[in-house]
Amino acid sequence: PLGRELPLMLAVMIFVLLLLWDGALGRFDASLLLLALAAVLYGLLLIVRAPTATEPDPLGREFAQELPPDAPAGRAWLRLALGLAGLLVGSRML
């Protein structure tokens, strides 16, 4: 499922590593970050304006399988609370 996203995430990590190589963010680094933000926003705009595909969205299909629409709301709230508690416990362990 991460076939398209993994190379992009790797590129972003390398970009941030290069920006932080000297230990500080300067004006040039900030301008590069703003340029990257503009590129991402432009890409999102192109995606939104593109005609919709005939095949269903894989993320939407996975979400529907994970949490069906007829699932009780109480169970969803419980899963949310447990997930947030897990994040808190995990952050304290670091």
Image: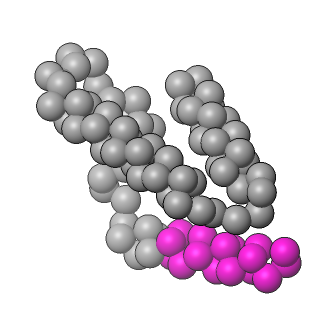
Q: Is residue 81 magenta?
A: yes
| Residue in the image at 41% along x and 45% along y | 35
Is residue 60 in sight in this rendering? no
| Residue in the image at 58% along x and 23% along y | 3
Q: On the image, which quarter does residue 36 sit in?
A: top left
* Side of 76 where 10 appears, left or right: right
| Residue in the image at 76% along x and 73% along y | 90
Q: Quadrant of the C terminus?
A: bottom right
- Give the number of marks: 0
Is residue 54 in sight in this rendering? yes
* Side of 9 where 56 appears, left or right: left
In this view, which residue lies farthest toward the front? 27
* Side of 2 where 62 appears, left or right: left
Q: Nearer the viewer, residue 33 or 91?
A: 33
Q: Is residue 56 magenta?
A: no
In this view, which residue lies farthest toward the right? 93
Q: Nearer the viewer, residue 52 or 29?
A: 29
Horizontal and vertical percent position of residue 47: 26, 31
* Side of 62 where 5 appears, left or right: right
Looking at the magenta stretch, what is its main secondary structure? helix
Q: Which residues are magenta?
A: 78-94
Horizontal and vertical percent position of residue 58: 40, 30
Horizontal and vertical percent position of residue 27: 52, 60
